[in-house]
């Protein structure tokens, strides 16, 4: 590599870094990505794609079994080897050749190695052979290094060789017994997957499952996991872990004991900032990075770090720890850096071209448990905590004709959270089989701030599950005349 000066240097070659670089190059600048692992990042190889591949076959079998005739054609259990082989294809067999080819096609430079900030707009890269090169940025350095699984300081846990989400996503052999510590998204999804693949799963959670979503959604998922044979220990903690010839033994805070062949830790994330040279810009290694509305890194007082040339996008800034929102930030940031380089003004108004308003008002998430959970915007609890005057509108999804056709004994629920003063949707949650495809309609309504009396004219096709929108609006309509 001969070129060492670029307009923008991005540390981290996951989907967030790729999106920043792509928008920078499309804006007429040069960009280099520094990456010490696989180009494509966590989502491509150890999270979004491979984990959903682990879940999809089981979901298809459950859908077939929910219909009397189709269910008769399902005469055997899942073949774990076939599921894992399909997972391997979606993880590109842990080769980033295709992603590197895309970088080359997009005109993005790749620097292999571990990058550290060593001065103003300067990144020193330690390559695999131990040699170093220094790359410099004319305009900006962007940190897009993401996050890693957090392993809590439970007595003995580090000594039992626990799995994190990476080991679970890349598993080669399905354990007969799997213990999961943590009842969030990763824990609940992996309980769903491994139970379907033949493991006897025990899940331990210090709170209700999926504490970040509406309680009714948590209740549906909890009931379904129990029906699937998952042993749940809720509102308890793990006090100690040890491994012997018989496997892993967990001692719980209520005195119960759990035995398993492997233990998966799914207790949150920690930022990948420990070895980035943050001390060179007055920040603490290992901390989450604070950013302003332009995604520029700021100190505790809110002042720009490094005279405004240092940015952070994706998980590492802790705004929304979801890949699609990190990519959204990356697109906005790449465009903003290009605009600033041309000396033009940014549009940071709400929903403006360079704003990341959706992070606060329309964050979207699908949890691929059985049943699925789809949510966007504010939960009722979050909206009330923010001081908003809201209406909560609930409806039984199973009562919708399209849902009854979709599966016998369809069970689910949908909720609208309405800003009572503006009569617009600010939150939506649905739980039930295949509700993921309902989500984008709600996202558009929230991002567009569509008044409910206008949304009334968006007629859902019959008979589809989308008829839930008509039923929710019918339920809420008597309140509309009361809106000033």
Image (spheres, grey):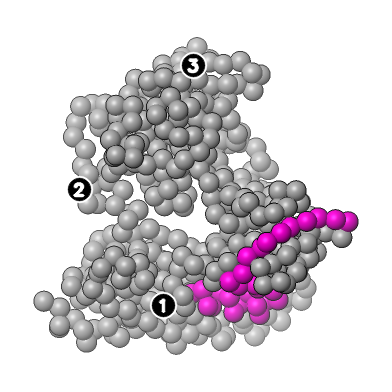
Q: Which mark is residue 414?
A: 1
Q: Which mark is residue 482?
A: none
For mark 3, give the secondary structure.
strand
Sequence-first tag of 3 and 1: 3
Placement of the C terminus among the 4 image quadrants: bottom left
**Cα–Cα span, label 2 and label 3:** 37 Å
Instruction: Give the camera-side residue of 306 and 133.
Output: 306
**Cα–Cα span, label 1 and label 2:** 31 Å
Q: Determine the image quadrant of residue 377.
A: bottom left
Instruction: Give the camera-side residue of 21 and 71.
Output: 21
Instruction: Give the camera-side residue of 336 and 181.
Output: 181
Q: Residue at x 78, y 56 (%)?
A: 242
Residue 29 appears in the picture as rendered? no
Question: Pointer 1: residues within 10 angstroms few (<14), some, or many (20+)?
Answer: many
For mark 2, give the secondary structure.
loop
* Residue at the disc numbered 3: 134
Q: Is residue 479 above or below residue 368?
A: below
Magenta segment range?
217-245
* Residue at the disc numbered 2: 349
For mark 1, give the secondary structure.
strand
């Amino acid at each position: 590599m001969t070129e060492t000066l670029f307009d923008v240097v991005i540390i981290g070659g996951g989907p967030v870094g790729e999106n920043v670089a792509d928008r920078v190059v499309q804006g007429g600048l040069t960009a280099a990505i520094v990456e010490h692992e696989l180009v494509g990042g966590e989502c491509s190889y150890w999270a979004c794609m491979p984990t959903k591949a682990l879940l999809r076959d089981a979901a298809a079998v459950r859908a077939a079994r929910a219909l009397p005739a189709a269910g008769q054609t399902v005469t055997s259990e899942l073949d774990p080897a076939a599921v894992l082989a399909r997972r391997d294809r979606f993880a590109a067999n842990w080769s980033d050749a295709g992603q590197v080819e895309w970088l080359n096609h997009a005109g993005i430079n790749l620097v292999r190695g571990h990058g550290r900030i060593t001065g103003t707009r300067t990144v020193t890269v330690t390559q695999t052979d131990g040699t170093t090169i220094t790359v410099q940025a004319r305009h900006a350095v962007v940190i897009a290094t993401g996050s890693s699984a957090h392993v809590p300081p439970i007595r003995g846990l580090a000594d039992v060789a626990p799995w994190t989400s990476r080991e679970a996503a890349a598993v080669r052999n399905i354990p007969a017994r799997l213990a999961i510590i943590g009842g969030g998204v990763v824990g609940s999804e992996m309980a769903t997957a491994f139970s379907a693949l033949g493991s006897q799963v025990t899940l331990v959670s210090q709170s209700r499952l999926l504490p970040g979503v509406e309680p009714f959604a948590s209740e549906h998922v909890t009931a379904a996991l129990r029906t699937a044979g998952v042993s749940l220990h809720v509102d308890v903690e793990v006090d100690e872990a040890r491994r012997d010839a018989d496997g892993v033994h967990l001692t719980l805070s209520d005195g119960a004991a759990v035995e398993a062949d492997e233990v998966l830790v799914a207790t949150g994330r920690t930022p990948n900032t420990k070895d980035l040279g943050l001390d060179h810009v007055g920040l603490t290694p290992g901390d989450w990075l604070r950013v302003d509305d332009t995604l520029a890194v700021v100190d505790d007082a809110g002042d720009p770090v490094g005279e405004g040339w240092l940015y952070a996008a994706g998980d590492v800034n802790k705004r929304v720890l979801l890949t699609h929102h990190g990519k959204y930030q990356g697109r906005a940031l790449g465009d903003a850096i290009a605009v600033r380089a041309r000396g033009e003004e940014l549009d940071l108004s709400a929903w403006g071209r360079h704003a990341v308003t959706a992070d606060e008002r329309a964050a979207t998430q699908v949890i691929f448990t059985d049943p699925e959970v789809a949510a966007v915007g504010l939960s009722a609890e979050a909206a009330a905590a923010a001081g908003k005057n809201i209406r909560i509108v609930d409806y039984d999804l199973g009562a919708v004709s399209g849902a009854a056709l979709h599966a016998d004994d369809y069970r689910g629920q949908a909720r609208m959270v309405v800003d009572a003063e503006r009569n617009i949707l600010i939150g939506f949650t649905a739980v039930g089989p295949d509700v993921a495809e309902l989500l984008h309609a709600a996202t558009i309504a929230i991002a567009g701030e569509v008044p409910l009396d206008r949304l009334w004219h968006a007629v859902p096709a019959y008979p589809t599950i989308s008829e839930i929108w008509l039923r929710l609006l019918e339920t809420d309509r008597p309140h509309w005349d009361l809106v000033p």
